[in-house]
């Protein structure tokens, strides 16, 4: 079986990451955006009706435990205990924290949202020669990570633009 052709594609030279986010939001598209750097490393972002909902980056960005520590949702002691448990069990860190009652589901949700936002902001800085392809209706991250956590797309666009966009793109 062959992989389906992308619905659209190009490079970040002609269409920036921010422009891709705006376009997907405007069209309220669902599917997976795949970004491939010149060294072959890939990142992917799942969109639900134009909102980014899950991301897997080419390199580890913002581990959930570190985000939760920064948010004050975990103590250093609980974080260390959870990492020791994770070393012996292969599972999602957030699920383990909630199961052990070290974290509430609400705090986990806030942590996952912040982690996703940070990953998306990192993707804003991808090199211009990065290739992108959008696969409408495809969820290539279904078996990876937790359930999707859709973010408010305008928040992502604005923060990304403030950090990474040039004057021309802001106009």
Image (tube, rainbow, N blue to C red):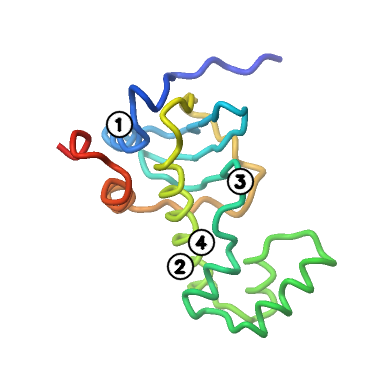
Q: Nearer the observer, disc 3 or disc 4? A: 3
Q: CA distance from mark 1 to mark 4?
A: 24 Å
Q: Residues within 10 Å of mark 2 (few under 14, many from 20)?
A: some
Q: Position of residue 154 (x, y in %)?
A: 27, 49
The residue depicted at 58 percent of the width and 78 percent of the height is 103
Q: Residues within 10 Å of mark 3 (few under 14, many from 20)?
A: few
The residue depicted at 62 percent of the width and 28 percent of the height is 40
Q: Quadrant of residue 52?
A: top left
The residue depicted at 42 percent of the width and 54 percent of the height is 117
Q: Name the element at disc 3.
A: loop
Q: Position of residue 58 (x, y in %)?
A: 60, 41
Q: Are marks 4 and 2 in contact (CB under 8 Å)?
A: yes
Q: CA distance from mark 2 to mark 1?
A: 26 Å
- 132 shown above or below 57: above
Q: Nearer the observer, disc 3 or disc 1? A: 3
Q: Name the element at disc 1.
A: helix
Q: CA distance from mark 2 to mark 3?
A: 22 Å
Residue behind mark 2: 110
- 26 shown above or below 120: above
Residue behind mark 3: 59
Q: Say which label, 1 or 4, has the lower sequence index.
A: 1
The residue depicted at 77 percent of the width and 67 percent of the height is 86
Q: Position of residue 105 (x, y in %)?
A: 54, 72
Q: Nearer the observer, disc 2 or disc 3? A: 3
Residue 112 marker: 4
Residue behind mark 1: 23
Q: Say which label, 2 or 3, has the lower sequence index.
A: 3
Q: Quadrant of the C terminus?
A: top left
Q: Quadrant of residue 43?
A: top right
Q: Position of residue 5 (x, y in %)?
A: 54, 15
Q: Say which label, 2 or 1, has the lower sequence index.
A: 1
């Amino acid at each position: 079986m062959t992989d389906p052709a992308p619905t659209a594609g190009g490079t970040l030279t002609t269409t920036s990451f921010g422009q891709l986010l705006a376009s997907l939001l405007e069209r309220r598209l669902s599917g997976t955006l795949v970004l491939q750097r010149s060294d072959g490393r890939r990142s992917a972002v799942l969109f639900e009706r134009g909102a980014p909902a899950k991301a897997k980056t080419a390199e580890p960005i913002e581990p959930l435990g570190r985000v939760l520590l920064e948010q004050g949702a975990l103590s250093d002691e609980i974080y260390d205990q959870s990492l020791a448990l994770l070393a012996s069990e292969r599972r999602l860190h957030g699920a383990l924290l909630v199961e052990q009652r070290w974290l509430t589901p609400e705090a986990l949700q806030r942590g996952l949202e912040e982690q996703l936002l940070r990953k998306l902001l990192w993707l804003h800085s991808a090199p211009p020669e990065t290739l992108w392809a959008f696969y409408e209706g495809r969820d290539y991250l279904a078996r990876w990570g937790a359930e999707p956590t859709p973010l408010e797309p305008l928040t992502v666009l604005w923060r990304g633009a403030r950090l990474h966009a040039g004057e021309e793109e802001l106009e």
